[in-house]
Image (cartoon, rainbow, N blue to C red):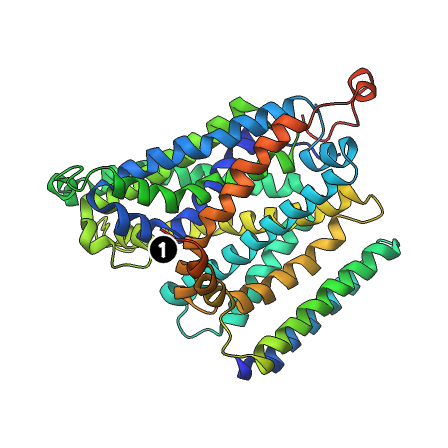
Amino acid sequence: MEVISRRQLMLTGTSFVLNATLLGPLVQVIQKGGTDAWMSVLVAALAAFLPVWMLAATAKRFPDRDLFQALADRHPVAGRIIGFLYIGYFFFLLCRDYRMMVLFINITLLEFTPLLVVALLILLCAVYMARGGLEVTARVTELWMFTFAVSIFLLPLLLASEMKIHHVFPMLYDGFAPVLHGAWYLFPFVGEIIALPFLAGFPTFGLKSGAKGFWLGIACIFILLACSLLVLGASVASRFNFPAYEVVRLIQLTDFLDRLELPLVAIWMPTMIAKLAFGMLIAGRGLSRMFPALSERELILPFGTLAVVCSFALFRDLTEMLLVNRLLPFVALVFQIGLPLVLLLALRPGRRQTGRAPQPARTK
Amino acid sequence: MKNDLWSGLAVIALLFALQVSLQRNERPATKWLGGGLMALGAALWVVFSVGIPAAKPVGLFMAWLEQLIPIP
């Protein structure tokens, strides 16, 4: 029986909010939001918190069961169709994360290493982690995500001398529309926290643990975006592929630690690999929950292999990734607002289920 | 991507061998589905590296979508 704690789930939520956002839409948020891009984080957070509340309310009705189980038990046909849709959605996100990570490593760290070699090494790590199960992956996330979040909270101190407050002025010069435009790009990324109820049921996933993880992730994004704006300025930051990485590169702590970005990337990398492992786990878990004849553990490597192939086939280069970021808000409206609302309204425990003892607990 | 055809297939073959060696479960449904997913991966790799190496599916889809609805 797999047991994960609320703190592990909270940090897993932070990982879902933060990790892909660092690689994906920050540059577009700054391009659209300009000097007011920091406000976009708050607007996107308010929008993305709605599905957390809806899914927490839904999960509360099915104690000790994740959403895949609840869907398959309550509505055998329609529930499985929705489950399949979510598996497809999370698989698409897995492919996107995979490609972004390989591209990031290729652009910033290992310029001459073949992409396939990088992809294979990441895949082996992620599969090894995911085959250990939810518990192992959550423990890795707990350890590294905490360290990463602490490092991000220290960044303003380390960058204080480089910050220039005039970079965020004038405020709202073009009105509120650029802020909303930036939030439109950010919202699908921070809303990825909806994966949590598919991994663990109530009471491990509840409004409290979901909200804590969500707002910790939002705080980290806010700090990184605000640092990028204050140090680089909107016009310079919007020209980098990875503005958060560039701003960390500016930190120089004595002559011995003049490349602080490398330890930070080394802390971030396991959390991102764990996020990929969660993606594979969701795919395998979803199928095994809906079709008990299937084994979750042994579907992880096939799903990982298919994700690598699809990531290379779907997204050819960084330009394609930026194009996807324009498409994602529409997809997110369906999966992060529409379907959670449907689940909230339609997914209620049946008469037989309310009176019977809960299924074997998978989380504490 | 054409140059990557054989290296890609070699990687998939390696992963397939790994999957077979790691498999402890006797449930045939899992074996068939797992093998099928890997075969699908290999087929997609061949299609995209030989058949349509310059294809940009996401770009094409976005171009089509932009004609239908305004995208911010």
Residue at the outermost top position = A355
- Point out the residue furthest to the front here: B68
SS of the residue at dot 1? helix
Disc 1 target residue: A262
Residue drawn at 28 percent across, 36 percent down: A39
Local crowd size for mark 1, using a 10 Å CA cut-off: few (<14), some (14–19), many (≥20): some
The residue at 25%/47% (across/down) is A228
- In percent of width and height, residue A330 lies at 47, 47
Q: Name the residue type under label 1.
A: Leu
The answer to whether residue A1 is above or below residue A162 is: above
Q: Is residue A100 visible?
A: yes
Residue A7, above or below A31: above
Q: Write down the quadrant of residue A122 in the picture.
A: bottom right
Counting every numbered tag in the picture gives 1
- The image quadrant where one finds the C terminus of chain A is top right
Q: Position of residue A177 (x, y in %)?
A: 26, 41
Please state the chain letter of the residue tagged with numbered disc 1 in the rendered image: A
Q: Can residue A260 be seen at all in this image of the molecule?
A: no
Between residue A212 and residue A75, name the one nearer to us.
A75
In the drawing, does residue A62 fall left or right of residue A141? right
In front: A216, or A250?
A: A216
Residue in the image at 40% along x and 38% along y = A149
Q: Residue A162 at what x, y percent from top left?
A: 16, 45
| Left or right of A361 on screen, residue A231 | left
Above or below, comparing residue A117 to residue A157 in the picture = below
Instruction: List x then y, in percent, for residue B50.
Output: 59, 82
The residue sitting at 31% across, 48% down in the picture is A29
Q: Quadrant of the N terminus of chain A?
A: top right
